[in-house]
Image (tube, rainbow, N blue to C red):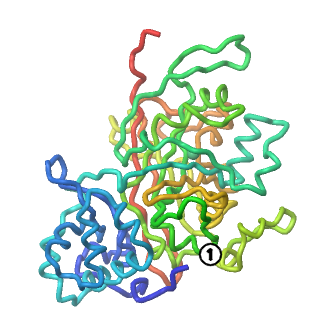
């Protein structure tokens, strides 16, 4: 794992004043990456680094030649419209670039004057997907989510016997992943009511969100070779937020025997900013497996995993309905959870994914699975909060929800805070449900 170093020093301040207010997601200790351009411009997308309420234009920095020779390749990769090239360079390159960015953006830096001309306000930019996502794999690592959902789908057999041995996952679809701001039409599909003799074709009636972490692969592995659990930190570029939308009624009818298909591949939304694993180093936590549970097989276990395999990341979900927008009331918080509750770690997911020799590639995305906490109120989906659609969730403006309605905007945020470290955050991922298209059959 990354050692704590001067880039994590909570006392560091930036000459970008908005980075120092203690509230921003993007103090100088964070330095996450996104791909952006000025809003509604025809300028090329390029890599940016967040600092306070600004974006540092990394293409402008690359053209300036201001950074030292040792990081010029990494800076040069940031002039590209995707992060894949930087991701492929590996942990030493990412870390070297982070160290120079930290020095250049801190108070007293002699680069303040030229870099101040490379800043663009975040409110004046638009984002694209941060990288070309070749493959998307979705895990299922919250045992609280797996148990709650399992008990709705299979009351007699909620948690299948493999759950505590295998990090369960399935191959998702990359083409329908979009960056925050996505709007999508309510999907159609085959649905079958429990008491109906036959299925019908219908717009989804049980549309849901899933609160997940996105894990971006940096440098991958050669086909046929595996990634050792203790080497995973050198292969993972960073994490962001992921809303992995789900059509629960379509899912219930289609999912056996091969798992989710059209219920899960119509839209997935990621937050624009990727927080690097090095930035997350202060918020790592010990990981443990209760003694009454099966202990992980050796390829899924290590002393380092036990010491700091988990991440302490607070996650929140908010809902903004059409009526809230009309009445200008604030979005309402639906739940809060934490990535530390995950039954399987990032290291275990990556080690397991590659144990058969499957090659992971720069820019590949792993979803963590819905991150529900141990308490009912900490559920990461409406399916759980409404107990399978049996109990309406009461909103403070008088509205109710069991599942999402047209016009609903779901917003998720995440942050890390710990004594002796700066507070850093992930920004947000937000997306909107549009009405189903009118179809004739
Ligand atoms: Mn999912």
x 23%, y 64%: residue:
79
Residue pictured at 54% horizontal, 37% vertical: 264
Would you say 211 lies left or right of 303 here?
A: left
Q: Position of residue 122 (x, y in %)?
A: 25, 60
Is residue 251 or residue 144 the one in the foreground?
251
> Residue 94, position in %: x, y?
39, 75
- Name the image quarter holding residue 155: top right
Image quarter for residue 413? bottom left
Is residue 305 visible in the rendered image? The answer is yes
Q: Residue at x 58, y 20 (%)?
A: 190
Which part of the image, by quadrant, shows the N terminus? bottom right
The answer to whether residue 431 is above or below residue 294 is: above
Q: Say which of 44 and 104 sits in front.
A: 44
State the residue in front, 51 or 269.
269
Q: Residue furthest right?
A: 292
Instruction: Respond yes or no on whether mark 1 lies under 8 Å from ligand 1.
Output: no
In percent of width and height, residue 309 lies at 63, 72
Q: Secondary structure at mark 1?
A: helix
On the question of residue 341 being in view, the answer is no
Judged left or right of residue 150, residue 239 is left
In percent of the image, x 29 and y 84: which residue is there? 70
Left or right: 408, with 366 as reference point: left
Q: How many marks?
A: 1
Q: Is residue 127 above or below residue 328?
A: below
x and y percent of residue 399 in the render?
50, 33
Q: From the viewer's perspective, is residue 182 above or below residue 140?
A: above
Neighbor class of circle 1 (other Cα within 10 Å; few <14, some 14-19, many 20+) is: some
Place residue 54 in its image quadrant.
Answer: bottom left
The residue lying toward the viewer, choosing from 87 and 308, is 87
Which quadrant of the render holds ligand 1?
top right
From the image, tell me which residue sits under label 1.
230
């Amino acid at each position: 794992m990354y050692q704590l170093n001067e880039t994590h020093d909570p006392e560091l301040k930036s000459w970008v004043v908005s980075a120092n207010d203690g509230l921003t997601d993007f103090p100088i200790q964070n330095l996450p990456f996104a791909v952006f351009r000025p809003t509604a411009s025809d300028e090329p997308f390029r890599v940016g680094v967040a600092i306070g309420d600004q974006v540092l234009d990394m293409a402008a920095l690359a053209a300036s030649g201001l950074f030292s020779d040792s990081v010029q390749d990494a800076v040069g990769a940031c002039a590209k419209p995707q992060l894949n090239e930087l991701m492929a360079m590996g942990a030493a390159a990412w870390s070297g670039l982070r160290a120079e960015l930290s020095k250049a953006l801190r108070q007293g830096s002699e680069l303040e004057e030229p870099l101040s001309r490379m800043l663009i306000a975040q409110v004046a930019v638009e984002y694209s997907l941060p990288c070309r996502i070749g493959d998307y794999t979705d895990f299922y690592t919250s045992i609280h989510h797996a148990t709650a959902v399992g008990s709705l789908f299979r009351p007699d057999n909620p948690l299948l016997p493999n759950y505590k041995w295998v990090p369960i996952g399935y191959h998702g679809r990359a083409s329908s992943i979009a960056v925050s701001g996505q709007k999508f039409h309510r999907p159609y599909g085959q649905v079958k009511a429990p008491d109906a003799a036959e299925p019908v074709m219908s717009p989804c009636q049980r549309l849901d969100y899933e609160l997940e972490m996105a894990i971006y692969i940096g440098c991958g592995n050669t086909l046929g070779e595996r990634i050792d659990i203790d080497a995973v930190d050198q292969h993972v570029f960073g994490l962001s937020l992921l809303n992995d939308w789900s059509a629960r009624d379509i899912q219930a009818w289609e999912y056996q025997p091969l798992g989710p298909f059209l219920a899960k591949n119509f839209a997935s939304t990621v937050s624009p900013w990727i927080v690097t694993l090095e930035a997350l180093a202060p918020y790592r936590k010990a990981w443990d497996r209760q003694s009454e549970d099966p202990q992980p097989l050796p390829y899924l276990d290590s002393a380092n995993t036990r010491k700091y395999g988990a991440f302490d990341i607070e996650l929140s979900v908010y809902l903004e309905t059409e009526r809230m927008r009309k009445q200008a009331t604030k979005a309402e918080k639906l739940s809060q959870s934490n990535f530390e509750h995950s039954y399987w770690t990032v290291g275990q997911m990556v080690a397991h994914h590659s144990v058969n020799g499957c090659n992971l590639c720069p820019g590949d995305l792993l979803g963590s699975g819905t991150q529900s906490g141990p308490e009912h109120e900490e559920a990461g989906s409406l399916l759980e909060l409404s107990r399978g659609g049996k109990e309406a969730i009461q909103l403070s403006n008088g509205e109710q929800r069991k599942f999402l309605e047209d016009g609903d905007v779901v917003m998720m945020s995440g942050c890390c805070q710990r004594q002796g470290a700066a507070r850093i955050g992930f920004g947000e991922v937000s997306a909107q449900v549009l009405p189903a298209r009118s179809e004739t059959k």
